[in-house]
Amino acid sequence: MKYFAIFGDPVEHSISPLMHNYLFLHSNIKACYSRVHLKNGADLKEMFVKLKLKGANITVPHKEDAYLACDEIRGFAKIARVVNTIIYEDGKLIGYNTDADGFVNALQEFEGIKKVLIIGAGGTAKALAHRLIDEGVNITVLNRSKDRLQYFKKHGIDCYSWDEFNVDKTDLVVNTTSAGLSDENLPAPKELLERILAQTSYVSDIIYGKTTSFLKLVAQKKIPYKDGLDMLVHQGALASYLFCDKTIPIDDITDLLKKAVLLK
Ligand SMILES: NC(=O)c1ccc[n+]([C@@H]2O[C@H](COP(=O)([O-])OP(=O)(O)OC[C@H]3O[C@@H](n4cnc5c(N)ncnc54)[C@H](OP(=O)(O)O)[C@@H]3O)[C@@H](O)[C@H]2O)c1
Protein backbone atom coordinates (compact mmCIF):
# COMPACT_ATOMS: atom_id res chain seq x y z
CA MET A 1 0.00 0.00 0.00
CA LYS A 2 1.26 3.50 -0.89
CA TYR A 3 0.28 6.50 1.22
CA PHE A 4 -0.30 10.07 0.02
CA ALA A 5 -1.59 13.21 1.74
CA ILE A 6 -2.32 16.91 1.40
CA PHE A 7 -0.75 19.28 3.95
CA GLY A 8 -2.36 22.65 4.65
CA ASP A 9 -3.80 25.09 7.18
CA PRO A 10 -6.75 25.10 6.71
CA VAL A 11 -7.09 21.77 4.94
CA GLU A 12 -10.64 20.60 5.74
CA HIS A 13 -11.95 22.26 2.54
CA SER A 14 -9.67 20.20 0.29
CA ILE A 15 -11.30 17.72 -2.08
CA SER A 16 -7.93 16.39 -3.22
CA PRO A 17 -8.52 13.16 -1.18
CA LEU A 18 -11.77 12.60 -3.10
CA MET A 19 -10.03 13.07 -6.47
CA HIS A 20 -6.94 10.99 -5.83
CA ASN A 21 -8.72 8.15 -3.99
CA TYR A 22 -11.25 7.94 -6.85
CA LEU A 23 -8.38 7.60 -9.32
CA PHE A 24 -6.65 4.92 -7.20
CA LEU A 25 -9.89 2.97 -6.85
CA HIS A 26 -10.73 3.07 -10.57
CA SER A 27 -7.17 2.30 -11.67
CA ASN A 28 -6.64 -0.65 -9.30
CA ILE A 29 -3.80 1.12 -7.51
CA LYS A 30 -3.29 0.07 -3.88
CA ALA A 31 -2.98 3.52 -2.37
CA CYS A 32 -4.69 5.88 0.03
CA TYR A 33 -4.73 9.72 0.17
CA SER A 34 -5.62 11.71 3.32
CA ARG A 35 -5.53 15.24 4.79
CA VAL A 36 -2.93 16.49 7.29
CA HIS A 37 -3.64 19.72 9.16
CA LEU A 38 -0.14 21.18 9.46
CA LYS A 39 0.22 24.38 11.50
CA ASN A 40 3.94 24.96 11.06
CA GLY A 41 5.39 24.62 7.55
CA ALA A 42 8.85 23.99 9.03
CA ASP A 43 7.55 20.61 10.30
CA LEU A 44 6.59 19.41 6.81
CA LYS A 45 9.60 17.20 6.09
CA GLU A 46 9.49 15.53 9.52
CA MET A 47 5.76 14.77 9.12
CA PHE A 48 6.18 13.52 5.55
CA VAL A 49 8.87 11.04 6.64
CA LYS A 50 7.06 10.03 9.85
CA LEU A 51 3.90 9.20 7.86
CA LYS A 52 5.97 7.14 5.37
CA LEU A 53 4.39 8.94 2.42
CA LYS A 54 5.15 8.13 -1.21
CA GLY A 55 3.91 11.58 -2.23
CA ALA A 56 2.02 14.66 -1.12
CA ASN A 57 0.36 17.88 -2.17
CA ILE A 58 0.90 21.10 -0.30
CA THR A 59 -1.67 23.86 -0.03
CA VAL A 60 -2.04 27.25 1.66
CA PRO A 61 0.16 28.57 3.33
CA HIS A 62 3.04 26.06 3.10
CA LYS A 63 4.13 26.03 -0.57
CA GLU A 64 7.24 28.12 0.02
CA ASP A 65 8.19 25.99 3.05
CA ALA A 66 7.66 22.92 0.85
CA TYR A 67 10.25 24.25 -1.56
CA LEU A 68 12.72 24.51 1.33
CA ALA A 69 11.82 21.03 2.62
CA CYS A 70 12.79 19.27 -0.62
CA ASP A 71 16.16 17.65 -1.34
CA GLU A 72 15.79 18.26 -5.07
CA ILE A 73 13.54 20.50 -7.18
CA ARG A 74 12.48 19.59 -10.71
CA GLY A 75 10.95 21.52 -13.60
CA PHE A 76 9.05 24.77 -13.27
CA ALA A 77 9.24 24.80 -9.44
CA LYS A 78 12.93 25.70 -9.80
CA ILE A 79 11.98 29.07 -11.28
CA ALA A 80 9.00 29.85 -9.06
CA ARG A 81 10.62 28.40 -5.88
CA VAL A 82 7.16 27.23 -4.86
CA VAL A 83 6.26 23.52 -4.47
CA ASN A 84 2.77 21.99 -4.39
CA THR A 85 3.71 18.35 -5.10
CA ILE A 86 6.36 16.18 -3.44
CA ILE A 87 7.42 12.67 -4.47
CA TYR A 88 9.57 10.38 -2.30
CA GLU A 89 12.22 8.90 -4.55
CA ASP A 90 15.32 6.93 -3.48
CA GLY A 91 15.27 8.41 0.02
CA LYS A 92 14.86 11.99 -1.25
CA LEU A 93 11.98 14.45 -1.32
CA ILE A 94 11.60 15.70 -4.90
CA GLY A 95 9.59 18.92 -5.35
CA TYR A 96 7.42 19.93 -8.32
CA ASN A 97 4.92 22.68 -9.10
CA THR A 98 1.78 21.60 -10.95
CA ASP A 99 -0.38 24.64 -9.99
CA ALA A 100 0.86 26.93 -12.72
CA ASP A 101 0.35 24.45 -15.61
CA GLY A 102 -2.97 23.45 -14.05
CA PHE A 103 -4.09 27.08 -14.05
CA VAL A 104 -3.08 27.62 -17.69
CA ASN A 105 -4.80 24.35 -18.76
CA ALA A 106 -7.97 25.45 -16.97
CA LEU A 107 -8.12 28.85 -18.67
CA GLN A 108 -8.65 27.65 -22.22
CA GLU A 109 -12.14 29.15 -22.62
CA PHE A 110 -10.91 32.70 -21.94
CA GLU A 111 -9.54 33.88 -25.27
CA GLY A 112 -7.06 36.65 -26.09
CA ILE A 113 -5.49 36.97 -22.64
CA LYS A 114 -2.53 39.34 -23.01
CA LYS A 115 -2.72 41.33 -19.76
CA VAL A 116 -3.47 39.87 -16.31
CA LEU A 117 -3.90 41.46 -12.89
CA ILE A 118 -3.02 38.99 -10.12
CA ILE A 119 -4.50 39.86 -6.72
CA GLY A 120 -2.32 38.33 -4.00
CA ALA A 121 1.43 37.81 -3.72
CA GLY A 122 1.73 34.43 -2.00
CA GLY A 123 3.13 31.15 -3.27
CA THR A 124 0.49 30.56 -5.92
CA ALA A 125 0.72 34.15 -7.21
CA LYS A 126 4.47 33.68 -7.75
CA ALA A 127 3.98 30.45 -9.69
CA LEU A 128 1.19 31.87 -11.87
CA ALA A 129 3.11 35.10 -12.55
CA HIS A 130 6.20 33.24 -13.82
CA ARG A 131 4.14 30.78 -15.87
CA LEU A 132 2.05 33.50 -17.53
CA ILE A 133 5.14 35.61 -18.26
CA ASP A 134 6.55 32.51 -20.02
CA GLU A 135 3.41 32.61 -22.20
CA GLY A 136 4.15 36.24 -23.11
CA VAL A 137 1.43 37.68 -20.85
CA ASN A 138 1.89 41.09 -19.23
CA ILE A 139 1.53 40.73 -15.43
CA THR A 140 0.66 43.19 -12.66
CA VAL A 141 0.45 42.09 -9.02
CA LEU A 142 -1.71 43.78 -6.37
CA ASN A 143 -1.36 42.80 -2.71
CA ARG A 144 -2.54 43.89 0.73
CA SER A 145 0.91 43.94 2.36
CA LYS A 146 3.98 45.61 0.86
CA ASP A 147 6.40 42.99 2.27
CA ARG A 148 5.48 40.25 -0.16
CA LEU A 149 5.91 42.60 -3.14
CA GLN A 150 9.70 42.60 -2.72
CA TYR A 151 9.93 39.26 -4.52
CA PHE A 152 8.06 40.58 -7.57
CA LYS A 153 10.09 43.83 -7.61
CA LYS A 154 13.26 41.72 -7.63
CA HIS A 155 11.98 39.88 -10.70
CA GLY A 156 11.03 43.10 -12.52
CA ILE A 157 7.27 42.42 -12.26
CA ASP A 158 4.95 45.46 -11.86
CA CYS A 159 3.50 45.26 -8.36
CA TYR A 160 1.55 47.50 -6.01
CA SER A 161 -0.15 47.60 -2.65
CA TRP A 162 -3.73 48.85 -2.44
CA ASP A 163 -2.96 52.52 -1.74
CA GLU A 164 -0.46 52.97 -4.59
CA PHE A 165 -2.36 51.18 -7.37
CA ASN A 166 -3.69 53.01 -10.45
CA VAL A 167 -6.43 50.96 -12.10
CA ASP A 168 -5.82 50.16 -15.75
CA LYS A 169 -7.59 48.12 -18.45
CA THR A 170 -6.85 44.38 -18.22
CA ASP A 171 -8.04 41.15 -19.87
CA LEU A 172 -8.22 38.96 -16.77
CA VAL A 173 -8.24 39.51 -12.99
CA VAL A 174 -7.21 36.49 -10.87
CA ASN A 175 -7.79 36.27 -7.15
CA THR A 176 -4.96 34.18 -5.67
CA THR A 177 -5.43 35.39 -2.07
CA SER A 178 -6.90 33.16 0.60
CA ALA A 179 -9.47 35.90 1.38
CA GLY A 180 -12.84 34.16 1.07
CA LEU A 181 -11.47 30.65 1.60
CA SER A 182 -12.87 30.19 5.09
CA ASP A 183 -14.47 33.63 5.59
CA GLU A 184 -16.49 36.16 3.59
CA ASN A 185 -13.62 38.65 3.12
CA LEU A 186 -12.96 40.37 -0.19
CA PRO A 187 -9.37 40.23 -1.55
CA ALA A 188 -9.14 44.07 -1.62
CA PRO A 189 -11.34 47.00 -0.51
CA LYS A 190 -14.73 46.91 -2.27
CA GLU A 191 -14.37 50.38 -3.77
CA LEU A 192 -11.02 49.40 -5.36
CA LEU A 193 -12.42 46.10 -6.63
CA GLU A 194 -15.39 47.93 -8.21
CA ARG A 195 -12.98 50.11 -10.20
CA ILE A 196 -10.86 47.08 -11.21
CA LEU A 197 -13.90 45.08 -12.33
CA ALA A 198 -15.10 47.99 -14.49
CA GLN A 199 -11.94 47.54 -16.60
CA THR A 200 -11.64 43.76 -17.09
CA SER A 201 -13.05 41.24 -19.58
CA TYR A 202 -12.76 38.09 -17.41
CA VAL A 203 -12.30 37.07 -13.78
CA SER A 204 -10.94 33.94 -12.13
CA ASP A 205 -10.99 33.11 -8.42
CA ILE A 206 -8.79 30.10 -7.70
CA ILE A 207 -10.73 29.24 -4.56
CA TYR A 208 -13.13 26.36 -5.30
CA GLY A 209 -16.11 24.75 -3.60
CA LYS A 210 -17.96 27.97 -2.80
CA THR A 211 -19.04 31.21 -4.43
CA THR A 212 -16.74 33.67 -2.67
CA SER A 213 -17.87 37.20 -1.83
CA PHE A 214 -15.53 38.31 -4.62
CA LEU A 215 -17.27 36.10 -7.21
CA LYS A 216 -20.67 37.29 -5.98
CA LEU A 217 -19.54 40.85 -6.69
CA VAL A 218 -18.24 39.79 -10.13
CA ALA A 219 -21.55 38.05 -10.94
CA GLN A 220 -23.46 41.27 -10.12
CA LYS A 221 -21.33 43.04 -12.76
CA LYS A 222 -22.16 40.29 -15.29
CA ILE A 223 -18.47 39.65 -16.08
CA PRO A 224 -17.66 36.10 -17.31
CA TYR A 225 -15.88 34.26 -14.50
CA LYS A 226 -14.77 30.87 -13.24
CA ASP A 227 -13.83 29.49 -9.85
CA GLY A 228 -10.83 27.26 -9.05
CA LEU A 229 -12.39 23.85 -9.66
CA ASP A 230 -10.96 23.31 -13.17
CA MET A 231 -7.54 24.42 -11.94
CA LEU A 232 -7.82 21.94 -9.07
CA VAL A 233 -8.59 19.11 -11.50
CA HIS A 234 -5.73 20.00 -13.87
CA GLN A 235 -3.09 20.53 -11.17
CA GLY A 236 -4.32 17.32 -9.50
CA ALA A 237 -4.05 15.38 -12.76
CA LEU A 238 -0.44 16.48 -13.20
CA ALA A 239 0.30 15.52 -9.57
CA SER A 240 -1.43 12.13 -9.97
CA TYR A 241 0.63 11.46 -13.08
CA LEU A 242 3.72 11.79 -10.85
CA PHE A 243 2.10 9.81 -7.97
CA CYS A 244 1.46 6.92 -10.42
CA ASP A 245 5.05 7.01 -11.74
CA LYS A 246 3.73 8.27 -15.11
CA THR A 247 2.13 4.87 -15.84
CA ILE A 248 -1.36 6.23 -16.62
CA PRO A 249 -1.91 8.68 -19.53
CA ILE A 250 -2.59 12.21 -18.30
CA ASP A 251 -5.84 12.50 -20.32
CA ASP A 252 -7.23 9.35 -18.64
CA ILE A 253 -6.31 10.76 -15.23
CA THR A 254 -7.96 14.11 -16.03
CA ASP A 255 -11.18 12.35 -17.13
CA LEU A 256 -11.31 10.33 -13.88
CA LEU A 257 -10.67 13.39 -11.70
CA LYS A 258 -13.43 15.31 -13.53
CA LYS A 259 -15.81 12.44 -12.67
CA ALA A 260 -14.61 12.45 -9.06
CA VAL A 261 -15.36 16.14 -8.44
CA LEU A 262 -18.94 15.61 -9.67
CA LEU A 263 -19.44 13.37 -6.60
CA LYS A 264 -18.93 16.38 -4.30
N1 LIG B 1 -7.84 25.78 -7.29
C1 LIG B 1 -6.64 25.32 -7.04
O1 LIG B 1 -6.22 24.28 -7.55
C2 LIG B 1 -5.72 26.09 -6.12
C3 LIG B 1 -4.34 25.86 -6.23
C4 LIG B 1 -3.49 26.60 -5.41
C5 LIG B 1 -4.01 27.50 -4.48
N2 LIG B 1 -5.36 27.68 -4.40
C6 LIG B 1 -5.90 28.67 -3.42
O2 LIG B 1 -5.16 29.87 -3.56
C7 LIG B 1 -5.16 30.60 -2.34
C8 LIG B 1 -3.76 31.10 -1.98
O3 LIG B 1 -2.89 30.02 -1.74
P1 LIG B 1 -1.31 30.29 -1.48
O4 LIG B 1 -0.71 28.98 -1.18
O5 LIG B 1 -0.76 31.13 -2.59
O6 LIG B 1 -1.37 31.17 -0.14
P2 LIG B 1 -0.25 32.06 0.59
O7 LIG B 1 1.10 31.78 0.03
O8 LIG B 1 -0.50 31.89 2.03
O9 LIG B 1 -0.64 33.59 0.17
C9 LIG B 1 -1.81 34.17 0.63
C10 LIG B 1 -2.03 35.54 -0.05
O10 LIG B 1 -3.36 35.95 0.33
C11 LIG B 1 -3.31 37.27 0.83
N3 LIG B 1 -4.39 37.42 1.82
C12 LIG B 1 -4.73 36.55 2.82
N4 LIG B 1 -5.81 37.01 3.48
C13 LIG B 1 -6.17 38.18 2.89
C14 LIG B 1 -7.21 39.11 3.11
N5 LIG B 1 -8.12 38.94 4.08
N6 LIG B 1 -7.30 40.18 2.29
C15 LIG B 1 -6.41 40.36 1.29
N7 LIG B 1 -5.38 39.52 1.02
C16 LIG B 1 -5.27 38.43 1.82
C17 LIG B 1 -1.93 37.43 1.43
O11 LIG B 1 -1.62 38.81 1.49
P3 LIG B 1 -0.63 39.46 2.61
O12 LIG B 1 0.74 39.45 2.01
O13 LIG B 1 -1.16 40.84 2.80
O14 LIG B 1 -0.75 38.62 3.85
C18 LIG B 1 -1.09 36.65 0.40
O15 LIG B 1 -0.80 37.47 -0.70
C19 LIG B 1 -5.79 29.65 -1.30
O16 LIG B 1 -7.14 30.04 -1.12
C20 LIG B 1 -5.70 28.28 -1.95
O17 LIG B 1 -6.70 27.42 -1.51
C21 LIG B 1 -6.22 26.99 -5.20
Image (spheres, rainbow, N blue to C red):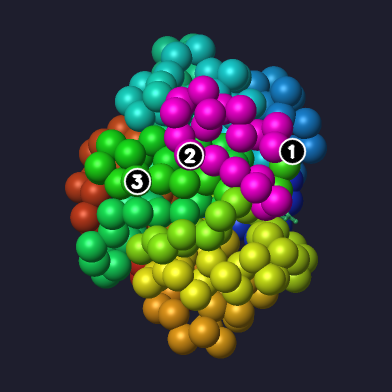
Circle 2: element type: strand
In this rendering, the answer to whether 247 lies above or below 25 is above
The label nearer to you, 1 versus 3, is: 3
Between 170 and 260, the one lying in front of the other is 170
What stretch of residues is rendered in magenta?
146-164
Circle 1: element type: loop
Residue 238, magenta (yes or no): no
Q: Report x, y in % for residue 171.
A: 36, 63
Q: Which residue is mark 1?
A: 38
For marks 1 and 3, give the CA distance.
Answer: 35 Å
Amino acid carrying mark 1 in the image: Leu
Residue 48 vs residue 205: left or right? right
Under 8 Å from ligand 1: the CB of mark 3? no
Based on the displayed image, in which of its 4 quarters is residue 234 positioned? bottom left
Residue 149, magenta (yes or no): yes
Q: Which residue is mark 3?
A: 138
The answer to whether marks 1 and 2 mark residues whose Cβ atoms lie closer than 8 Å is: no
Residue 236 vs residue 150: left or right? left
The answer to whether marks 3 and 2 mark residues whose Cβ atoms lie closer than 8 Å is: no
The answer to whether marks 1 and 3 mark residues whose Cβ atoms lie closer than 8 Å is: no
Amino acid carrying mark 3 in the image: Asn
Q: Report x, y in % for residue 55.
A: 49, 33
- Please give the label number shown on residue 169: none
Query: Residue placed at 60% from the left, 19% from the top?
Result: 69
Query: Residue placed at 52% from the left, 84% from the top?
Result: 221
Circle 3: element type: strand
- Please give the label number shown on residue 158: 2
In this rendering, the answer to whether 255 lies above or below 89 is below
Give the crowd class for mark 3: few <14, some 14-19, many >=20 residues within 10 Å.
some
Query: Residue placed at 27% from the left, 69% from the top?
Result: 109
Give the crowd class for mark 2: few <14, some 14-19, many >=20 residues within 10 Å.
some
Give the crowd class for mark 1: few <14, some 14-19, many >=20 residues within 10 Å.
many
